[in-house]
Image (cartoon, grey):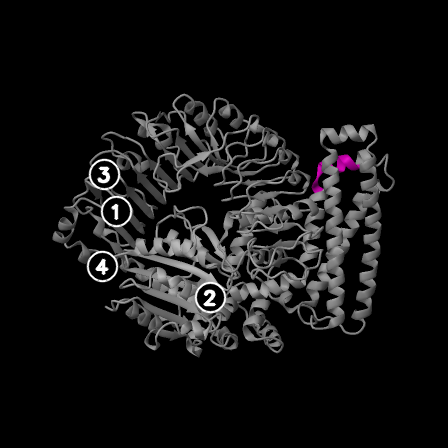
Amino acid sequence: MAEAILTAVSKIEIVVLSKAVSNVIEMLSKKVAGVSELPGKIKKIDDELQMLNNVIVDIGTTHLSNNVVKDWISNVRKLAYHVEDVIDMYLCEALKLTKEDFIHRYLLGGSRHIIVFSKIVDDLVEIEEEIKHVKEMQNNWSNTFVPIKNERENIYRTPPGACFPVLVGDEDLVGIEENRSKLTEWLSTDEKECTVITVSGMGGLGKTTLVKNVYEREKFNFPGAHAWIVVSQSYDVVDLLARLLRKLGQTFDVGAKPDVYELTEAIHRTLQDRKCLIVLDDVWDKEAYTQMCNAFQSLQGNRVMITTRKEDVAALAHKGRRMELQPLGKDESFKLFCSRAFHNNNPYRKCPPKLKTVAAAIAEMCHGLPLAIISCGSLLSTKQPTEHAWNQMHNHLRSELREKNHVQAILLLSYYDLPGTLMNCFLYCTLFPEDYPMSREALVRMWVAEGFAIKKNYSTAEEVAEENLMELIGRNMLEVVERDELYRVTNCKMHDIVRVMALDIAREEMFGYAHDEGEIMVMDPEVRRLSTSSWKSEGSRPAPAGVEFPGLRTFMSIASSTMISSILSRSSNLTVLELQDSAISHVPATIGNLFSLRYIGLRRTNIQSLPDSIEKLSNLETLDMKQTRIEKLPPGIVKVENLRHLFADRFADERQTEFRYFVGVEAPKMISNFQEMQTLETVCASKDLSQQLRKMSKLKTVWIDNLNASNCEELFDALSKMPQLSSVLLSASDETEALSFQALKPISTMLYRLIIRGNWAHGILKCPIFQGHTRYLKYLALSWCNLGTEDPLMLMAIHLPALVYFSLNRVSNAAILVIPAGCFAQLKTFVLKNMPNVKELVIQDKAIPCIEGIYIVSLREMNVAPHGIESLRSLKKLWLLNLHRDFRADWDLKQMHDKLKHVPELRA
């Protein structure tokens, strides 16, 4: 309800804090009547918006069905959008005047700027009149009834994020044991033919959760191949088959646009003589399966699991292989609710006696739907566990249920309970396609660009945005799809039922429109955000031509390249432009006119170069052109002094078999102009790069490619002096180039990730980087180096106390590797891959006590089982693949399978 106000208020805060704007106003006040009064007027408007926001919050959801109130809120929303437009114009023109050429024009007359600022003065007078009007409207409806104070405001909240669960564990999977056993049995039968298994039921019953749990447990019984494919309502069979082929570890070489037949044949060849497990998740149309099945149906032993809400899709399996989920029973519902509501009381998750009655009543309202139960439990987990607070939430939920179905009511209650700063972040996620895995890093940067997260105290805007994301995940408004090796969220998504609700809110608020089904809908030209991810340029219905959205802030065209030229030329306030995976092959020069543009996403497109006009984008913060064809940047880009995140590399070998399979871009001269830069990923080493990096004190992530012996010392010395350095990749020019790391002595206490690719000079393991300067390091990956007869584990062990992930790939070293006693106390993942000399691994007493995953792959000389591995009680995954031909005999002789029965996932 108040999302538009919050955006306008955040924009005002940016203006108020800008010294550049203050200086411009002082300069213009002598030439433009009324300009000197702008700061005061803006402050008063800010106060009025804050007051209107408080009124809306006080109303809560109690009177939203009243048409008079709805009409008033609509007028407030239009007012807020008007304020945002004027503030953006104000900030834009003020910043333009700070540039040398604009100041020169101003001194010569500056007639254009006089006209613009005169209009801003007039617009603010108009806004003052609009404020008076909405306040008069408020007086009219407030006399007809007294707004009920929003009850949620009286319920004490625990600190944001203080008690959210880190992950969904087995203890959260209530009531699935019988169904899980049945699915496992169906997968493990001796049936020779391809078997289809369907799991059906209404939305929110936990179909995907159940199947995902079974899939993760059973996929390693299908060593030939396994793949998880999300289908959803809008799908393209070519895309589905291409994704399946990639998941099976293959790429397609026949042309840029393979057809169904070519992909089917490629999958069929890949799966020949291999037993596979395929999951097709969220299937709405049986044609999706029938168009794909020729690729795997005729192969013996294959298993296909399908989740669906549709009966005709469920009927694809014969009756003995269909499972229709039912709502949870009363006891199971209460258990699941408590596991979420009281997870801060781990490991017991028990309901306090004083809350049992009200907790049971709330759980019963969810009608046995796991999605509703988990959402409700997550909501209640943010409240203090008092009878007063819980009874108020129970009463509020009961009133909501009178108007809506139980799932919608609970989800809406969770939405309206969000702190104001999170509402816009949440609605923004609706712009991504259904079931789309949203990148944590991309979301964070987009939210910052839109002004949904701003710098606070000692936290950067990006850190504030990341806190917002983690709170949305904790509140169960977003689901975690994938985590990295350090267990940080990498991708998340919206449950489709949650997204339907959020889309309705976003459209009603004119916050944004997302078109998933290729239909051209009638949209308000003042729409602020637009996603066209499913409009196909070759489709039967063409994309709209000549469209104008003057108020547009975000345009997202994932996997589609329609409307881009029109948007760039007619949406002057555009802030975020996301075109990843689209077919776009060039960027129009008109992009330089978008002064407010802060985020450009071109990842995985066919772009070969950027126009010179990009140098005009002085507000640009993020430029993502990773995995494009761009080799170098326009020289003028160094004028974009506010650039904070630069992602730029391209694949030289998509199969990633060559040493230099990715190549960085040529660093522009005077790259040190980027004084705000935090991320530089990836640039090629050059003669003067080290001198430039010494001037960039805010860098956190630095990836450098094409290093050689002549330039590495200066570059390493420059990196060592960066106070905030946190993530570093160093890649040599080729696998024979011997690099010396003597000069690499990082002073940063934030360095958590180090990736080194390439050969090393003699004695490197005794350099400072591995002898004390990496004590904070959590992630270390070393590849393509020759250590002679040295054992890196023995030499590094005592100097890497915080290491969580350690990988050695294509490393030549001693024949026997030893993990010393008591070392690597926090290590969770250990990888040894393609190491030609290693014959034996010895794990000494009390070493790696927290290890969860060990992956030993393609060590062709390793002929004996790892000594001491059976003592690792925390181990969950163990891979021992492609080893010496005598390894299996030694493994069986020592009865290692029996000794490692406690390891859930064992592949030997």
Label 3: which residue? Answer: 817
Q: Which residue is mark 4?
A: 901
The quadrant where residue 416 appears: bottom right
Q: Nearer the viewer, mark 3 or mark 1?
A: 3
Q: Magenta region: which residues?
A: 17-25
Asked if marks 4 and 2 touch (Cβ < 8 Å), the reply is: no
Assess disc 1: are there few (<14), some (14-19) or many (≥20) residues with their C-alpha within 10 Å of its C-alpha: some
CA gap between label 4 and label 1 equals 20 Å
* As drawn, 552 above or below 213: above
Tell me which residue sits at (46%, 36%) in the image. 749
Chain-order first, disc 3 or disc 1: 3
Of the image marks 4 and 2, the number of the one nearer the N terminus: 2
**Spatial CA span between label 3 and label 2:** 44 Å
Q: CA distance from mark 1 to mark 2?
A: 35 Å
Q: Residue at x 81, y 57 (%)?
A: 131
Name the mark on residue 340: 2
Q: Residue 121 at what x, y percent from top left?
A: 83, 45
Q: CA distance from mark 4 to mark 2?
A: 31 Å
Q: Is residue 374 left or right of residue 191?
A: right
Categorize mark 4 by other alpha carbons within 10 Å: few (<14), some (14-19), many (20+).
few
Q: Judge by depth and name the residue closer to the eye, 333 or 105.
A: 105
Residue 855, percent across and down? 29, 47
As drawn, which residue projects farthest toward the left?
893
| Disc number placed over residue 787 in the picture, else none | none
Disc on the earlier residue, 4 or 1: 1
For the residues marked 3 and 4, what is the alpha-carbon distance in whole angstroms?
Answer: 25 Å
> Which element carries disc 2, helix, strand or loop?
helix
